[in-house]
Image: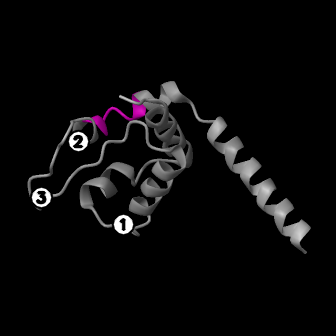
Amino acid sequence: MKRLTTSLVGFGMLLSGAVYAAADVEAGRIKGQTCLGCHGVANYNNVYPTYHVPKLAGQHAGYLVTAMKAYKEGLRSHSTMYGNVVDLSEQDMQDIAAYFAQDAQ
């Protein structure tokens, strides 16, 4: 049983890596331009309600995809983020995440 579990976990990790490897960084750069309006400004705070806007550059791609999906599915609540991700496809999210993950500015 332990061997089967280990094999399944390893196979899952292999597949998830393949998904991220298929992302197009250049397409992500183009698709992610809108994100830079808030997430590309150092120490940016939203006006109302006031909260810190996180920097995306250098974040792990898997985290970024998970966050975008959570906004799209309503698991994270923010109307601006929802509006920006609601029409993104899985590939769009992968591309955008790949771009920001490799960009450590």
In the picture provided, is 8 more to the left or to the right than 91?
A: right
The quarter of the picture where residue 23 lies is top right
**Circle count:** 3
Say which residue appears at 42% left-offset and 28% top-offset: 29
The quarter of the picture where residue 79 lies is bottom left
Instruction: Tell whether label 1 touches label 2 (CB within 8 Å).
Output: no
Amino acid found under the numbered disc labelled 1: Arg
- Point out the tag, 2 or 1, that comes first from the N-terminus: 2
Q: Which mark is residue 15?
A: none
**Is 31 inside the magenta-drawn segment?**
yes
Amino acid found under the numbered disc labelled 3: Thr
Task: Name the one closer to the observer, 33 or 50.
Answer: 50
Q: Secondary structure at mark 2?
A: helix
Q: Secondary structure at mark 3?
A: loop
Instruction: Tell whether label 3 touches label 1 (CB within 8 Å).
Output: no
Q: Tell me the CA gap for discs 1 and 3.
A: 17 Å
Query: Magenta part of the protein: which range?
Result: 30-36
* Residue under pointer 3: 50
Q: Secondary structure at mark 1?
A: loop
Q: Tell me the CA gap for discs 2 and 1.
A: 17 Å
* Residue under pointer 2: 38
Quadrant where the N terminus is found in the figure? bottom right
Q: Residues within 10 Å of mark 2 (few under 14, many from 20)?
A: some
Front position among marks 3 and 2: 3
Front position among marks 1 and 3: 3
Task: Name the one closer to the observer, 93 or 21.
Answer: 21
In the picture provided, is 75 more to the left or to the right than 77?
A: right
- Residue 18 is situated, as x and y percent measured from the top left of the image, at 71, 42
- Point out the tag, 3 or 2, that comes first from the N-terminus: 2
Considering every residue shown, the one lying at the far front of the view is 2
* Residue under pointer 1: 76
